Image (spheres, grey):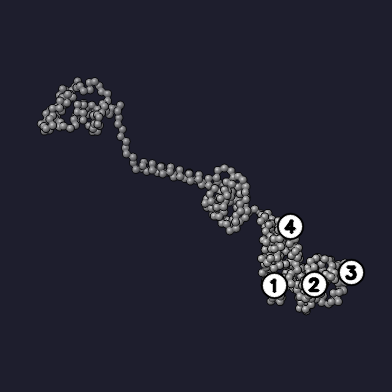
Amino acid sequence: MNEDRSGAGFDPLIGEPPGGIDSPARRPDADLPSAGDSPSARPAPQAIAAATTAASPNEPVAAAAGPRGAPAPGDMLLDPEAIAEDEALFFGDDAWIRFRRPWGFWRRLLVLVGGLALVLGGAYWWGNSWLQRQLDPPGEAHGSFLVEIPSGAGVNDIARILASEGVVANATIARLWWRDAADLQAGSYYFAENMSVDAARAVLESGPIPPVFESITIPEGLWLSEIADRLLDSLPEFDPVELQAALTDGRIRSRYVPAGITSLEGVLFPDTYQVDETGVSDERDLVRRMVEQFDTVAAQIGYDDAPERIGLTPYQLLVAASVVEAEAARSEDRPKVARVIYNRLNEGMPLQMDATVLYAIGQRKSSLTLTDLDIDSPYNTRRFPGLPPTPIAAPGRESLAAAMNPEPGEWLFFVLVERDGTLFFTEDYDEFLVRAADARARGVF
């Protein structure tokens, strides 16, 4: 401590920092006694310094001399009057020391809550901004391209496919956003790149685009060769060799065709078929569909019960239905033609159906010659009894049903009597000859 320093500017409560305290500006006579002071009331700095210097380190404190007693080494010199004067100078208007109160609990809590609110608010803003970018990416959707959604694909699969194609930004976000979507259909859809999740969902919920179809109609009564020609004419992409193989190699089969028969004659169901872009070059796919359609219709009519109800196998019933299809033009005549067939079979008579002869010669003619009628073919029912070995045409639903449900009657003969296809039925051969001659005279046939 700087003991020779005067008390001015010294704060006995705080103490003196190392290096001393620079006193504030003081009057030149600050250390001199005032006019009202007595010489003994305030010792001069020199006296204090001398007294301090004269004190011996080995001398007891009690032996100190002076009006207030000699200070021991290291003791602070406390002069109340000097302290009062120094305080007035030190804490004057020009030199205030301000002490702040410690922060209270509520102020600290308020700061903590405010800081936490700022952090959470910033996190929410960033998260919400990120989510909005995933739901609706910046920029406009552009381009248009086809995306195929495979059969059986769920929401997860669809979201992944669209994300990989660049349609939506995030598969996970799209999947969560579509969790309440109705059943989405497989098929082809047109999408754009950089679409919003809502826009992509709207495309999905509108359903797949209708495929581009080629429509082809197969009428009743055609031979297998005629069906093949119609398919090749309607679908130029079909390969004739591949189509012929599909029709005859036995790889495509009907459940009603017995083993050993590879021809699909009679089991290509006559109907209208739609062929899409991939099917126009797939011969076997269309042939398979036509056979499957025949099996479906035959099962609906009851062909599995043919042995019990008619006494024929399902395939024999199909052969009979093909003859009905070839001989009867009107719906009401078909069950009667079926009855004539069964009556002749039961009597052991040859069927003598001209349609079977036409199939045997491979030509469609309005009249048959004696040579035609004498052709050596198992399909010539004028020479060979029983049913032909295979169907002779593609029967439609009505003919298939007529063979399964023949009309009761004793008829053994029928003849065309009108140009609209009306047939006359009789069990009397002479009556048959008379009606046949009349129809021929009128130019019906």
From the viewer's perspective, tell me whether residue 221 is left or right of residue 140. Answer: right
- Inspect the image, locate mark 4, and give the three-letter code of the amino acid beneath it: Ser
Q: Provide the residue designation for mark 4.
A: 234
- Inspect the image, locate mark 1, and give the three-letter code of the amino acid beneath it: Pro
Where residue 247 appears, as percent x and y from the top left, is: 70, 64
Where residue 325 appears, as percent x and y from the top left, is: 76, 68
Label 2 vs label 3: CA separation? 30 Å
Q: Provide the residue designation for mark 2.
A: 376
> Which quadrant, please, contains the C terminus?
bottom right
Label 2 vs label 4: CA separation? 35 Å
Mark 4 and mark 3 lie on one chain; the one further toward the N terminus is 4
Contact between labelled residues 1 and 2, with CB atoms less than 8 Å apart? no
Q: Is residue 108 visible?
A: yes
- What numbered label is drawn on residue 441? 3
Contact between labelled residues 3 and 1, with CB atoms less than 8 Å apart? no
Mark 2 and mark 1 lie on one chain; the one further toward the N terminus is 1
Label 2 vs label 1: CA separation? 27 Å
Vertical side of 219 occupied by 343: above or below: below
**Residue at the image position 18 percent from the left and 30 percent from the top:** 77
Q: Is residue 296 visible?
A: no
